[in-house]
Amino acid sequence: MGLQCGIVGLPNVGKSTLFNALSNNKAEAANYPFCTIEPNVGVITVPDERLQILEKIVKPQKVVPTVVEFVDIAGLVKGASKGEGLGNKFLANIREVDAIVHVVRCFENDNIVHVAGKVDPITDKDIIDIELQLKDLESVEKKLAKSERAAKTGDKKAKTEVESLTKFKNHLEEGKNARSLVLTPEDHEAVADLFLLTLKPVIYVANVEEEALNTGNKYSQQLAKHIADENAQLILVSAALEEQISQLETAEDKALFLEEYGLKESGLDRLIRTSYSLLQLITYFTAGEKEVRAWTIRKGWKAPQAAGVIHSDFERGFIRAEVIKLSDFQHE
């Protein structure tokens, strides 16, 4: 199963710079809004040292890691929910992704123009949230009107939908994201066809200066406090530094570079790991002479579902699977 994350944020917060660090598909990074007009899609491999262990043991003809797609989506401005700027394109593209990577500017640099004229991570974050909430509210209200009409005819399912949709409507009108609601299975079912933007899992990326990578700064601390009641993750990244790391050719060079900054892993690795955790994903492996391959599945899936990721016939005709822990395989 593929994982697709949409990189979003106001213009000039470091989205395209981060994307360039994540992908070999270089997006144009320029000091003006909307330099990314069509979404750039980068498919990157997920680093996993277990693949290297299996390669040494099995000695396959090839090794196939699992991948993550990152989509660099055009910058958003106030009024996007009503079509301002590139709002319609933005909202259509973000609706298709599994998770949102929301890049927030948490650094000062007089040479890089800020669309609002000053560094203010809370206001920046809220501008995007409000636009997404307004779009979700529009979707909820349209369906609520239909469900209310059906409920008047005695439709029991419609009555349940009205209760759930009203809950979403009230929450969004309060300026809150749908993901912060405590939801029942009925609530999820009521909005399943709406693909609500603020219901998607989100990772906030505080784009900080290099010196603040380990400790954060006043801006990232403000952001962390502001999102404390959301079901969201926050990581510190220096997009400019990540772009430098991505240009190094060997793993040894990258390790030395990270060591200089007191880092154990790159922001890319943290972002992938956080994405997997947020979406409740895990990896399993198949190993043989032809190939060692990593497969992405959801945590809690049973063996037939996991087999179905390889091929749907494997799930339909599933009989049994032989499973072994990597640690046991190492010591055979």
Image (cartoon, rainbow, N blue to C red):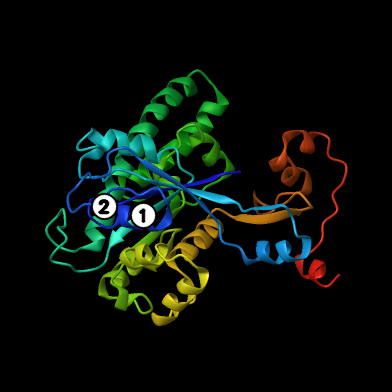
Which residue is painted at 30% across and 59% down in the image?
104
In the image, 100: left or right of 65? left
Q: Which amino acid type is marked by label 1? A: Asn
* Label 1, label 2: how far apart the Cα atoms are: 8 Å
Q: In the rendered image, which quarter is residue 221 located in? A: bottom left
In which quadrant will I find the N terminus? top right
Q: Residue at x 20, y 38 (%)?
A: 85
Give the residue type at disc 2: Ala
The C terminus, quarter of image? bottom right
State the image coordinates of residue 328 (x, y, percent, origin top left).
82, 69
Please say if the residues under marks 1 and 2 sit with CB atoms less than 8 Å apart. yes
Q: Secondary structure at mark 2?
A: loop
Q: Nearer the viewer, residue 293 or 174?
A: 293
Q: For mark 2, what is the residue?
A: 29
Q: Position of residue 18 (x, y in %)?
A: 35, 57
Could you tell me if residue 227 is visible in this image? Answer: no
Q: Which residue is mark 1?
A: 20
Q: Position of residue 304 (x, y in %)?
A: 78, 43
Callout 1: SS: helix
Query: Counting residues from the N terminus, which is met first, the one under dot 1 or under dot 2?
Result: 1
Mark 1 Cα shell of 10 Å, populated few (<14), some (14-19), many (≥20): many
